[in-house]
Amino acid sequence: MDNITIRYTDHPKLDDPIFIEGLPGIGNVGKLAAEHLKDELKAVKFAEIFSKYFPPQVLVQDDGQVKLVNNEMHFVKRGPGRDLVLLTGDYQGLTPEGQYELSDFILRELKKLGVRRIFTLGGYGMGRMVTKPRVLGAATGADLVKEMEKYGVVFSRGEPGAGIVGATIRRARRPSWTSSRNTWVSRSPSTSSRTRRSRSIRSRRS
């Protein structure tokens, strides 16, 4: 088995798609948000990602059958407007190396799909009760900061970007992946599972 493999079950033709990633993390906020979008928009699975960087585990499904842990990509055709590609999954990479390898792999696949704008979602533990949830964000372009501030996103200096969220942002900044057109990477953290959840968004521009 290669370190990372992808199995396509379909090859959809997408119109300038936007990518949204939500994997398990603090409070499972990113995972829950992405899966909510998947369910509400009736997204269609078109690819499965398997990796040695995931735990050596299987999950027992509702019908009693087992499933090797993986990440899955789904698409949404939006008619007029840009299509969506959603990434959900059972785990992130277990090691720093795995985070970077998976990020590189996913970004290469997204480039093939024509993705130019990326949102990565994740939880952000505050360590205290939050009485007024906020959407926290970070962007790699001043114009993106201004655009997102219009929607109430709060930009807080020093907010960390760890795990698959940070790895994807850092890898997507490389000239070998980016183009001259707009690309966003965004993050939506929240508080820990013991506190009220707030989300945050990270974005980037190429």
Image: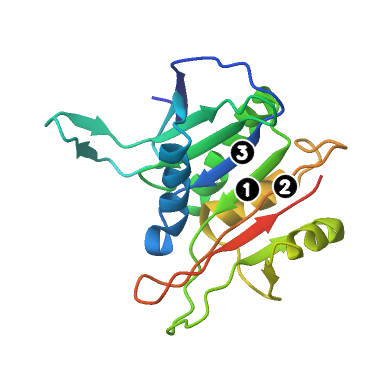
Residue behind mark 2: 184
Q: How crowded is mark 3: few (under 14 residues within 10 Å), some or many (20 or more)?
A: many
Residue at far front of view: 80
Quadrant for the N terminus in the image: top left
Q: Which amino acid does label 1 sit on?
A: Phe
Which picture quadrant has residue 39?
A: top left
| Residue 41, x across and y down, in percent | 48, 35
Query: Which residue lies at the image location 75% right of the left edge and 48% below the top edge?
Result: 173
Q: In this view, does 172 lie above or below 108?
A: below
- CB atoms of marks 3 and 2 within 8 Å: no
Name the mark on residue 19.
3
Q: Is residue 95 above or below residue 155?
A: above
Give me the C-alpha separation between circle 3 and circle 1: 6 Å
Query: Which residue lies at the image location 86% right of the left edge and 57% below the top edge?
Result: 143
- CB atoms of marks 2 and 1 within 8 Å: yes
Residue behind mark 1: 119
